[in-house]
Image (tube, helix red, strand yellow):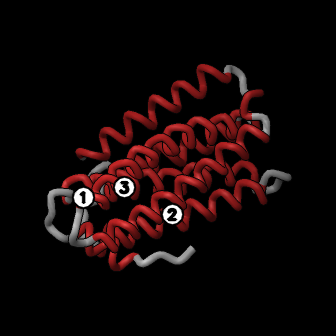
Amino acid sequence: MKHNLSSAAKAIATKSKHSKYLNQLVRVDQAGELAADYIYKGQLMVFKHTELKPLITHMWEQEVHHHKTFDTLQTEGRVRPSLLTPVWRIAALSLGFLTAIRGKESAMACTEAVETVIGGHYNSQLRYLLEAEMKTKEGNEGIENLKKIVSEFRDDELEHLETAVANDAHGAKPYWLLTEVIKKGCAAAIKIAERV
């Protein structure tokens, strides 16, 4: 789906009572989509000559699109990037690579854990944007476009979660420990990226 990034970026750059939140939203989502891009890049390094290549490539291509979209919003909206961007790259590439080395089930458990947290995170953002859209008289078009972007990307992330479950994520050993550690790491990264 093609989005009007200019109006969304304008809403982000315009000083309003929502400015702080919109800046955090873009900073966190850009960092998160960068991390997702690198997680799948790490997984594809392991699975590039296997039957999983098309599946991982499909999810990776969606994440690259998300990443590029938030890069554009960050630049056009004049949002400061996360100061920890190099850390996010290394951590995400390592996470993708290491879970893939452990096998298909661990890679899929990683995807399930990450996308569970991100789906919930995007839902929280959508609630805020819906409320802001209802209360804001100026800049509604920009907030509406940002809401459409977040909604579409949330749906893609939930599709990835379903794909992971359908591809033996629950077969990872130890499933519970692996997914809980990854979920807690993702939630912590979100909190850190909001501020740093």
Question: From mark 2 to mark 1, how far is it between C-alphas?
Answer: 27 Å
**Residue beneath label 3, please?**
130
The amino acid type, in three-letter code, at marker 2 is His
Q: Position of residue 51 (x, y in %)?
A: 85, 52
Question: From mark 3 to mark 2, how far is it between C-alphas?
Answer: 21 Å
**Residue beneath label 2, please?**
66
Q: In the image, 100: left or right of 154? A: right
Residue name at image x 38 percent, y 48 percent: 127
Mark 1 surroundings within 10 Å by alpha-carbon count, few (fewer than 14), some (14 through 19), many (20 or more): few
The amino acid type, in three-letter code, at marker 1 is Lys
Label 2 secondary element: helix
State whether residue 98 appears in this view. Answer: no
Whether pointer 2 and pointer 1 mark residues with C-beta atoms closer than 8 Å, the reply is no
Label 3 secondary element: helix
The label number, if any, that marks residue 135 in the structure image: 1
Observer-nearest residue: 63 or 165?
A: 165
Q: Position of residue 157 (x, y in %)?
A: 58, 51
Q: In the image, 117: left or right of 83? A: right
Question: From mark 1 to mark 3, how far is it between C-alphas?
Answer: 9 Å
Residue at the right extreme of this rendering: 51
Of circles 2 and 1, which is in front?
1
Q: In the image, 162: left or right of 149? A: right
Vertical placement of 196 versus 17: above or below? above
Of circles 3 and 2, which is in front?
3
